[in-house]
Image (cartoon, rainbow, N blue to C red):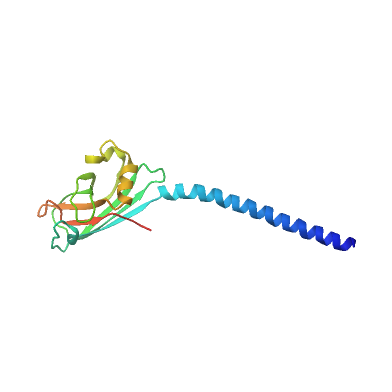
Amino acid sequence: MMFINTTRKLEITAIVAVLAFTTVSVTGLHNINVIMPAFAQQQQTFTAKLSGNNEVPPLTTTATGLAQFQLSSDGNQLSYTLSAKNLNNFMMAHIHQGKPGEMGQPVAMLSMGNGKITSADLQGSLAGKQMSDLVSIMKNGGAYVNVHTQQNQNGEIRGQILTVP
């Protein structure tokens, strides 16, 4: 009888240990899940594929481009790269507020190559606002990149800014 009781005690102790470890593990995972979405929310990446077909009205051009954006971990700065092929007589580029098919007001200036946007750079309807306001518009599909040339001053290539999964 003593051997059976010892075995049962060991089984019960083992079960309690497993349950305690599982509880600690689940609690730890729960805490990670609380922390990680906030961190992941800040590490946002966006992209826009630029073409004349996206202009309003659509434009026939051989020019194409790509804009890529990365939000800093603290959410206060948006780093970007803007590139284009077959684009002549570049004038300027902006992030505009607007859905596909809509023309919208510029809210941030862009340059070719690499750059950074902070809340101090916001203009138009976002002047005086925070980076989170721009990021919110971008997440909701309400912003696009427009590249202007001397030949097409209203824009030669355009692309909606989309969240990268």
Residue located farthest toward the left when viewing the structure as drawn: 151
Residue 21 falls left or right of residue 56: right
Image spot of residue 27 (x, y percent): 60, 50
Residue 14 falls left or right of residue 104: right
Quadrant containing the N terminus is: bottom right
Residue located farthest toward the top when viewing the structure as drawn: 128
- Which residue shows up at 23% across the image and 50% down it? 98
- Which residue shows up at 82% across the image and 62% down it? 7
* Whether residue 123 is visible: no
* Whether residue 30 is visible: yes
Residue 28 falls left or right of residue 7: left
Residue 82 falls left or right of residue 9: left
Task: Say which of 145 and 13 sits in front.
Answer: 13
Q: In this picture, is 118 found above or below 58?
A: above
Find residue 53 and report its image quarter: bottom left
- Which residue shows up at 77% across the image and 60% down it? 11
Image spot of residue 99 (x, y percent): 24, 53
Image spot of residue 18 (x, y percent): 69, 57
How many numbered discs? Answer: 0
Image spot of residue 63 (x, y percent): 17, 61
Quadrant containing the C terminus is: bottom left
Residue located farthest toward the right when viewing the structure as drawn: 1
- Which residue shows up at 23% across the image and 44% down it? 107
